[in-house]
Image (spheres, rainbow, N blue to C red):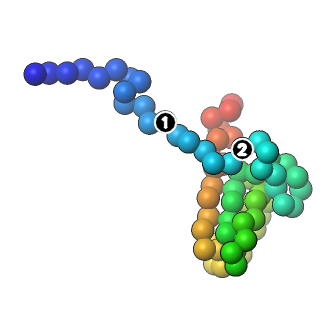
Amino acid sequence: MNTLSTPAENTAVLEYRLSAMDRCDSCGAQAYIAAEVNGSELLFCAHHGRKYEEKLRSIATSWHDETARLAEAR
């Protein structure tokens, strides 16, 4: 039996955990990056996340990046 799938069936639904309520710890803009460092979560906008990424990646136990959402909004 051949079955055809619709585009909706093939589209993965992305779920984001950061919301508009999550704010950058550096400037207060909407956070798109969350890093866990020493058991604390740090939130950053795309700008500050990129600015501090090199230093934080070496000490962060997790790095959650939702900056792809910025391209989707355009």
Q: Is residue 54 visible?
A: no
Residue pointed to by mark 1: 13
Local crowd size for mark 2, using a 10 Å CA cut-off: few (<14), some (14–19), many (≥20): few
Quadrant in which the C terminus is drawn: top right
To which quarter of the image does residue 33 belong?
bottom right
| Closer to us: 68 or 20 | 20
To which quarter of the image does residue 16 belong?
top right
Residue that appears at 49% across and 36% down? 13
- Give the number of callouts: 2
Residue 45 horizontal/vertical position (percent): 77, 53
Q: Is residue 18 above or below residue 14?
A: below
To which quarter of the image does residue 39 belong?
bottom right
Local crowd size for mark 1, using a 10 Å CA cut-off: few (<14), some (14–19), many (≥20): few
Q: Is residue 24 above or below residue 39?
A: above
Residue that appears at 20% across and 21% down? 3
Q: Along the horizontal axis of the image, is 22 left or right of 4?
A: right
Residue that appears at 89% across and 56% down? 27
| Closer to us: 70 or 11 | 11
Q: Is residue 41 above or below residue 17?
A: below
| Label 1 or label 2, whichever comes before in sequence order | 1
- Helix, strand or loop at mark 1: loop
Q: Along the horizontal axis of the image, is 9 left or right of 66?
A: left
Q: Is residue 19 visible?
A: yes
Q: Please tell me the numbered disc located at residue 3.
A: none
Residue 68 horizontal/vertical position (percent): 62, 45
Amino acid type assigned to the residue bearing label 1 in the image: Val
Distance from disc 1 to disc 2, alpha carbons, whole Å, reads 16 Å
Q: Please tell me the numbered disc located at residue 19.
A: 2
Residue 70 horizontal/vertical position (percent): 68, 40
- Helix, strand or loop at mark 2: loop
Amino acid type assigned to the residue bearing label 2 in the image: Ser
Residue 17 horizontal/vertical position (percent): 63, 48
